[in-house]
Amino acid sequence: MLSIHKYAGGMSANSLTNRLGIDDFIIELMRISPRHLPLDQLKNLVMRLEVNSFLLTPHIHFCNAGYTRNLLCRTSRFDMLVLCWLPGQMTTIHDHAGSLNVTRVCSGTLTARLFQVRDRPVPGRALLELQMEQQLGENEFSLVDRNDIHQLANMTEQRLVTLHVYAPPLRNITVYNSYTGQIEPVALRYTLEDDFA
């Protein structure tokens, strides 16, 4: 079931006064079982996270072959990645196989699309329709609930850097082919620093 407020805007004054360093952020998220974590609470914690160049810079790597997924932190309850996008790079249409996700734009403009299954007449296939598309700027957020289907893209001529938090950690996704309707589970990998050596 799609919720009404799938994507939300920037920072509130209250979130700016109650900032969390990375250590405190990890402690706060480790206190909550991902099964009991509401999406709004995850968003609130990501809003409060102090994001600075010290945190991000070691994890910013771009690649001409596709956007990069650079692991910043992984625990038993969540993982955090920095994704780096060159112009025109985008994800597949996918879900997160039960994980919550909050994406925060660090620089650039993110295009976030939300889809809904229109028809599933054949097992292993699904016809999708676009429900929402938004362009999000710096310090704005894209929210994905446990069963949502979405796509992210850099549709600008500028580079894009986004911070992603998944709870529980994202190990697999389900990819939806919008042309054939085929559904395919896919195991994820991170873009390792060695890839850029």
Image (cartoon, helix red, strand yellow):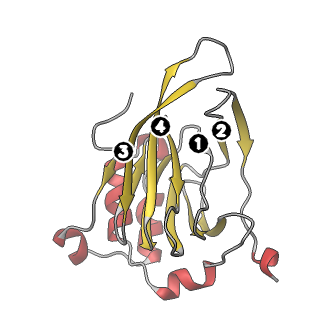
Structural crowding at the residue carrying mark 4, measured as other residues with C-alpha within 10 Å and reported as few (<14), some (14–19) or many (≥20): many
Answer above or below: position of 32 versus 145.
below
Disc on res. 38:
3
Name the residue located 37 percent from the left edge and 62 percent from the top edge: 136
Residue at mark 1 to residue at mark 4: CA–CA distance:
10 Å
- Quadrant into which the C terminus falls: bottom right
- First of labels 3, 2 by sequence position: 3
SS for tag 3? loop
- First of labels 4, 2 by sequence position: 4
Q: Position of residue 143 (x, y in %)?
A: 40, 50
- First of labels 1, 2 by sequence position: 1
Q: Are marks 1 and 4 in contact (CB under 8 Å)?
A: no
Residue marked by disc 4: 148
Residue at mark 1 to residue at mark 3: CA–CA distance:
23 Å
Tell me the amino acid under the disc marked 2. Val
Regarding residue 42, the answer to whether it shows in the image is: no
Structural crowding at the residue carrying mark 2, measured as other residues with C-alpha within 10 Å and reported as few (<14), some (14–19) or many (≥20): many
Q: Are marks 1 and 2 in contact (CB under 8 Å)?
A: yes
Q: Nearer the viewer, residue 181 or 50?
A: 181
SS for tag 4? loop
Answer above or below: position of 170 versus 178.
below
Residue marked by disc 1: 93
Tell me the amino acid under the disc marked 3. Pro
